[in-house]
Amino acid sequence: MINITLKQLRYFDALVRCGHFGRAASDCSVTQPALSMQVRELEGTLGVALIEKGSRPFRLTVFGQQFAQSIGPVLRGVDELGELARASIENPIGVLRIGVIPTIAPYLLPRVIRNLSHHFADVTLKVLEAMTSNLINGVLEGRLDTAIVALPVSEALLMEHTLFSEEFVLVRPPEDAGKPVPNPEKLKEIKLLLLQEGHCFRDQALEFCNISEPLSHDLMDGSSLLTLVQMVSSGIGVTLIPEMAVDVETRAASVATMRFDAPAPARTVGMIWRKNNPLESHLLQISEVIKDAHKKCQSEPSR
């Protein structure tokens, strides 16, 4: 019987995901020598090389590639066993591993954390802010219990639970405040500032304007909503931001905000988790707390 440990499998899985020994060690919260030693011991236990010797950057052997594909279901199964145990005890969650996309995290997360701490005092939150694709993978692989993202994600293994919807708001220079709100066709003629590729909010804005990526040569990319608003304040162009971000991002910027005529562009925000997650009933309770946090954010007066 081959004595493979879960630690060895998790370290090797992290190495494959991160593509780098140092980043994998950081992901596992261990030193690089410790991770390297576990991978070497795994190879010794298997009696087969997983990594090509002397390759820089490292490359998996043919067997290493096959092995990497096979351990994913094993680790997910182990995580599900742990979740099953967590769901059966008095304090079912313990640590809630939650992911949030960048266009939601700074605006909703502070109140969500306060509300969750109040309603679930025994739960420790571990939050990851990342783009949608990374969060989906994190939930699928069991590294996250749930994530707050824009729906739909259209992943067969995930449950989607709607939290709320919110409109997009046009941000433009203050001298344009009295001008009519441009329709999607008119926006094509204006220098439109958008988030960098990979952000789902970018794709939603392009869809509203009916702009395809190959034809978006006159667009300008920003790394955050803050950057986009400051660029508008400098007179570079216009942008769209979600309603929840308006108060925070325009507070110190010389810009004008306008709402679109109906049907206004909008997004649906929700939670995702694995369909076979035994914590589902608890995640539904948490979703109600998040909905309440959003309502209170909407009712707070602008400062």
Image (cartoon, grey):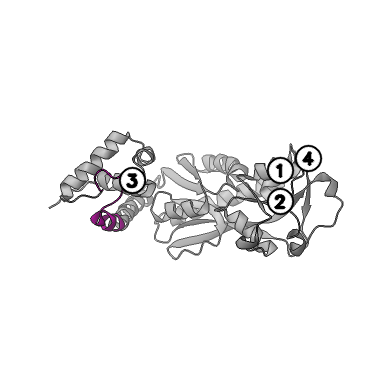
Instruction: Specify the farthest residue to the right.
Output: 178
Label 1, on which residue? 231
Q: How many marks?
A: 4
| Rendered image: mark on residue 43 | none
Task: Tell me which residue sits at (38%, 54%) in the image.
Answer: 141
* Residue at the (61%, 54%) spot, across then down: 201
User: Label 3 vs label 2: CA separation?
Assistant: 39 Å
Badge 2 element = strand
Residue where numbered disc 3 is placed? 15
Element assignment for label 1 = helix
The residue that disc 4 covers is 254
Mark 4 or mark 3, earlier in chain:
3
Residue 183 place in picture, x, y as percent: 77, 62
Residue 60 lies in magenta, yes or no? Answer: yes
Label 4, label 3: how many angstroms apart (C-alpha)?
46 Å
- Which residue lies under the disc numbered 2? 239
Q: Is residue 35 in sight in this rendering?
A: yes
- Range of residues picked out in magenta: 52-69
Work out how far the residue at label 4 is from the one at label 1, CA to CA, in angstroms. 10 Å
Task: Answer whether labels 4 and 2 touch (C-beta < 8 Å).
Answer: no
Image point (24%, 45%), residue name: 53
Decide which of 171, 61 is in the foreground and name it: 61
Residue 17 lies, in percent from the top left, at 37, 49
Q: Earlier in the sequence, mark 4 or mark 2?
A: 2
At x 40%, y 49%, the residue is 143
Tag in front: 4 or 1: 1
Contact, CB < 8 Å: mark 4 with mark 1? no
- Left or right? Give the position of 131 relative to 249: left
Q: Residues within 10 Å of mark 4 (few under 14, many from 20)?
A: some
- Closer to the N terminus: mark 1 or mark 2? 1
